[in-house]
Image: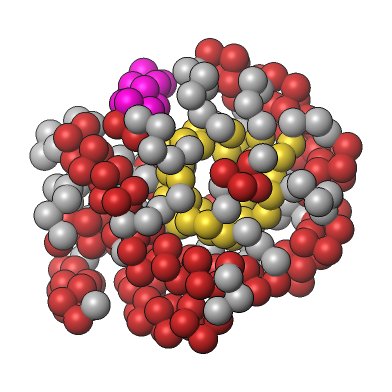
Amino acid sequence: MLQQQLRGTGVALVTPFTSSFEVDYNALGRVIDFVINNGAEYVVTLGTTGETPTLSKDEKKQIVLYTYDKVNNRVPVVVGIGGNNTQEVVEELKTFPLERAVAVLSASPYYNKPSQEGLFYHYKALAAASPKPILLYNVPGRTGRNLNAATTLKLAHEVPNIAGIKEASGDMAQCMQILKDAPANFLVVSGDDLLGMPQIACGMQGVISVAGNCFPKQFSNMVRHALNNNFVAAKTINDQLLAGYDLLFAENNPAGVKAFLALQGLIENNLRLPVVSLSKDLYEKAKDYLSKL
């Protein structure tokens, strides 16, 4: 069922802030409407793009509740809950408001660099505790440890409630191995905007995207064309977005996407430390790119 619900473009939502760095719910509402009205198939709240490391537990819960209400069943909602303290993540899975979520996206533990066996048992514990299906999230560029194909496949085949993976290793050989040997009902989506189109060609079922916040129409159309095996049309759109992808990730995420959203009048360009706004030179390049897109 998740393979139907979460096929296409999922948007890893930003968390807009006011000038005093409070959560800006009005702006969040505008972003949610913007991405849904422009074709996103689902949204992901509390992903890394939402600056979750700088949000309090109470803020996280309020953001989840607001997102459910604003989305109002128009599209499915996935909630991000992860961390490097397994027991704490287990507690959050038991206490967070997950009734209206279709799945939980859980980034693998960062900094403490567990072995593959440690990663397996971490996710096994999360799957046992979660009231919703777990989507693995492999992003070694941020966590410092790759969840390899063998571990992903072991989790997929042996652990009930592990329903899919957001794969952002950038390793195409690893991705193809997972796609080749995963169970038929295991959801595999890209976590890399730049590689989304070729990874769909390999068999992935969509992308959980950063670019979908600020280029939702173009990006979701590109993904749909790719999923329909219309790669000529997909490539035409993707080629237009290549320079945009570069600007999104030139300094850090979500500085790039927040700059683009601010330029479109949807949010204020504020980020919580230690992340800062896009530098002036890149901001001007973003403005120029947007005017031509």
Q: Is residue 68 magenta?
A: yes
Give 221 or 249, whichever is nearer the viewer: 221
- Image quarter for residue 288? bottom left
Indicate whether 2 appears above or below 254: above
In this view, which residue lies farthest toward the top? 95
Q: Is residue 128 magenta?
A: no
Q: Position of residue 214 (x, y in %)?
A: 29, 59
**Magenta stretch: dominant secondary structure:** helix
Tell me, what colour scheme is on the image?
Answer: secondary structure
The magenta stretch is: 55-69
| Identity of the residue drawn at 63% across and 26% down | 132
State whether residue 29 appears in this view.
yes
Indicate whether 167 appears above or below 242: above
State whether residue 55 appears in this view.
no
The number of numbered badges drawn on the structure is 0
- Image quarter for residue 87? top right
| Identity of the residue drawn at 19% across and 81% down | 292
Query: With 59 as the anchor, is 103 left or right in this view?
Result: right
Give 220 or 276, whichever is nearer the viewer: 220
- Image quarter for residue 86? top right
Query: With 198 as the anchor, is 213 left or right in this view?
Result: left
Indicate whether 208 appears above or below 47: below
Query: With 97 as the anchor, is 136 left or right in this view?
Result: right
Q: Position of residue 187 (x, y in %)?
A: 69, 49
